[in-house]
């Protein structure tokens, strides 16, 4: 039997210096997309027969035969491979590295026989569906938007931005679009920022389409579940995939629609490895396969908003809440004009806000207090010698957690019991400064005797099932006052909440990151959207903002629920400063044992770039430390690369980054380097 050669991508990082595809020999013909095991050096690694050769053919003499073919798995599709190829190029990673890393890990572990057995059991244990619920009739606004969606051809890759206030019925339009897609025999991919936070959506999909047609894909699944769900989608047995960012790489042979809910949410950007934006890849995937993409948000990302303004995206608006409920009345509480407290320390909540909460409790309504800082206090302080609870391994304070009396570093995890006395001078009087959710909840208990106070944040929800239990307690009315971080601001359909208060939002107004204002506005709009979801109570719904800057334009726009005014002013600032969406950015990060090593590496990288003549196409800034420069004893430096043109930036990175790999042996102190294309924060 003659041996033929096939281009294969393998699971090695691009910086290993291997070609993008390697040739392997096989007697049997191998379809593109077939999963394999192949020898690489002394190891056996996973590989995929690729859709085309991406490198020069390997030397005939060095060719080795395939080790094993995982024939149990139907080959991956061409569109899937194109998506991976694009993402690898755009985010500057190896094709094989990305391709294998986005498959369920079990696919790399199981042999052909084991996989065959899993495939045979795929449909076992799927319960019969409860009767499906019929869709509600649309209101006038929804109907108008739906008419436009229906008029668009189902092979039109132009994305649609569905800009609708919280509770305006966006999800209902996703469901209608999904129904239309299913009716045409195609699959739906629906991306959400975090599945755990929106169990209601999964339930709504199951009610409408039947649980047996639906699978979820997210990092909370066990490896076996993830494989099973992925296979159901890949084999076409599941029609609807609901997932987090990693689901953008789901294999969907009959993809007909991509929905991205809360498209502005930062969690769509992967923060390690290939730092892809699932939202942006969704748009690409729609374009690639000529399928509709629906991006929904009350506060779109400025990128998507700008595309809609420019007419590159279709835009649909929903301005009213379903059922005529009103958006909460936004009240700015001017902290600078409060009578100064007797004791000197400002209270957690200003008296008028406290009274408003008391009135809610008296009426049996709920209040939500938003504070984006977990723990009891952000730092412990010794008034005698000035000691602060610094982390020994990071340039950050360790946070005081009162419940288990620990000092915990939120960056490296370093945890110790709270010292009885100051470690430096022995002073017994060390005290917490500032306030986190734990302290706020404690203070609410004191200020509102008899009130049932609950707290939801990353600490309170660590145990399995804890979040569900806590959310249920809120939904069933066992809680009067809920204290929480941004976790509680997103998505929840709380019916009993009529007051939302942002306790200390000002810090984000003056943060150094250029997206801080955008994020704050989105968070506050979202949080406000938790109030008055029950139309009968919405007239009384209020959102309170405790601020020292009541005249800030961000708050002025928030008061009017006017996202477009906010976006317009942000766009003017971005344009003036040459920031996205008016420029394309990448961050080159270096991590080293000492700052000097990282700096030397980035210096030489800069010289290389200038040597290549990249200085005309892109602007290279001087390296700077990120906000927290040292984490777990590793020093970090980052360098901004900017260009007015996305394409110029892409080309520059593609020619420059491969050279950096060769610098590594000269810079032994550098532990890691990586590039982040379209970084969320700089
Ligand atoms: P959004 O996604 O914009 O926050 P939803 O689609 O979740 O809004 O709608 C908010 C609430 O209104 C949900 O409880 C939903 O079931 C309900 N709803 C949406 N559309 C309609 C409709 N046309 N008729 C009746 N109820 C609706
Ligand atoms: Zn001291
Ligand atoms: Zn630390």
Image (cartoon, grey):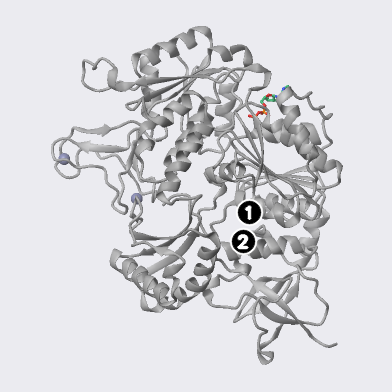
Look at 77% across and 67% down and name the residue there.
112
Is the C-beta separation of discs 1 and 2 under 8 Å?
Answer: yes
Q: Which residue is mark 2?
A: 87
Residue 489 visible from this viewpoint:
no
Q: Residue furthest bottom?
A: 61
Is 525 situated left or right of 286 in this image? left
Percent across and percent down for residue 442 are 38, 23
> Assess mark 2: CB under 8 A from ligand 1?
no
Percent across and percent down for residue 499 are 49, 18
Relative to 422, say whether 642 is above or below. below
Q: Quadrant of residue 192?
A: top right
Q: Quadrant of residue 264?
A: top right
- Disc 1 to disc 2, C-alpha distance: 7 Å
Q: Which mark is residue 281?
A: 1
Residue 257 visible from this viewpoint:
yes
Which badge, 1 or 2, is on the more N-terminal residue? Answer: 2
């Amino acid at each position: 039997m003659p041996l033929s050669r096939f281009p294969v991508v393998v699971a090695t990082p691009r910086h290993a210096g291997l070609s993008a595809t390697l040739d392997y020999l096989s007697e049997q013909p191998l379809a593109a997309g077939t999963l394999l095991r192949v020898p690489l050096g002394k190891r056996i690694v996973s590989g995929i027969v690729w859709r085309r050769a991406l490198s020069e053919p390997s030397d005939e003499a060095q060719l080795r035969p395939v080790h094993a073919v995982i024939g149990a798995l139907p080959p991956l599709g061409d569109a899937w491979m194109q998506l991976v190829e694009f993402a690898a190029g755009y985010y500057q990673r190896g094709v094989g590295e990305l391709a294998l890393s986005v498959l369920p890990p079990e696919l790399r572990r199981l042999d052909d026989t084991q996989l065959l057995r899993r495939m045979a059991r795929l449909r076992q244990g799927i319960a019969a569906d409860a009767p499906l619920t019929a869709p509600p009739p649309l209101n006038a606004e929804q109907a108008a938007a739906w008419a436009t969606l229906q008029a668009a051809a189902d092979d039109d890759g132009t994305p649609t931005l569905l800009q609708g206030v919280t509770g305006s019925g966006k999800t209902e339009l996703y469901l209608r679009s999904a129904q239309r897609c299913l009716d045409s025999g195609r699959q739906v991919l629906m991306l959400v920022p975090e599945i755990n936070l929106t169990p209601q959506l999964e339930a709504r999909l199951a009610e409408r389409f039947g649980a047996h047609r639906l699978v979820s894909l997210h990092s909370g699944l066990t490896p076996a579940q993830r494989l099973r769900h992925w296979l159901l989608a890949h084999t076409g047995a599941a029609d609807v995939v609901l997932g987090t960012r990693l689901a953008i790489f789901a294999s969907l042979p009959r993809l007909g629609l991509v929905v991205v809910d809360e498209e502005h949410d930062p969690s769509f950007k992967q923060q390690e490895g290939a730092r892809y934006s699932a939202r942006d890849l969704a748009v690409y995937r729609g374009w690639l396969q000529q399928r509709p993409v629906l991006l929904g948000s009350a506060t779109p990302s400025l990128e998507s908003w700008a595309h809609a303004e420019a007419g590159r995206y279709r835009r649909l608006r929903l301005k009213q809440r379903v059922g005529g409920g009103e958006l909460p009345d936004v009240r700015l509480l001017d902290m600078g004009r409060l009578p100064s407290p007797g004791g000197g320390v400002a209270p957690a909540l200003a008296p008028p806000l406290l009274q408003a909460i008391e009135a809610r409790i008296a009426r049996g309504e709920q209040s939500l207090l938003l504070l984006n800082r977990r723990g009891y206090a952000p730092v412990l302080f010794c008034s005698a010698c000035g000691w602060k609870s610094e982390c020994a391994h990071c340039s950050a304070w360790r946070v005081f957690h009162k419940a288990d009396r620990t000092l915990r570093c939120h960056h490296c995890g370093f945890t110790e019991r709270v010292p009885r006395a100051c470690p430096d001078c022995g002073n017994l009087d060390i005290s917490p400064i500032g306030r986190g959710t734990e302290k706020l909840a404690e203070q609410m208990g004191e200020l509102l005797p008899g009130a049932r106070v609950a707290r939801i944040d990353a600490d309170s929800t660590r145990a399995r099932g804890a979040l569900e239990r806590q959310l249920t307690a809120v939904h069933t009315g066992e809680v009067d006052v809920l204290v929480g971080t941004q976790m509680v601001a997103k998505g929840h359909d709380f019916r009993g909440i009529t007051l939302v208060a942002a306790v200390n939002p000002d810090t984000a107004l003056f943060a150094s990151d250029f997206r801080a204002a955008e994020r704050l506005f989105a968070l506050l709009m979202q949080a406000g959207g938790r109030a008055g979801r029950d139309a009968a109570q919405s007239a009384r719904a209020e959102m309170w903002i405790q601020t020292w800057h009541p005249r800030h334009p961000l708050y002025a726009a928030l008061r009017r629920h006017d996202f477009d005014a906010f976006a317009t002013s942000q766009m003017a600032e971005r344009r003036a400063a040459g920031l996205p969406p008016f420029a394309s950015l990448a961050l080159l990060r270096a991590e080293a044992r000492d700052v000097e090593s990282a700096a030397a590496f980035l210096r030489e990288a800069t010289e290389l770039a200038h040597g290549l003549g990249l200085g005309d196409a892109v602007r290279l800034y001087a390296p700077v430390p990120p906000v927290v420069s040292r984490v777990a004893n590793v020093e970090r430096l980052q360098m901004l690369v900017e260009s007015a043109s996305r394409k110029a930036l892409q080309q520059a990175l593609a020619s420059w980054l491969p050279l950096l790999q060769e610098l590594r042996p000269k810079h032994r102190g550098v532990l890691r380097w990586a590039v982040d294309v379209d970084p969320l924060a700089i």
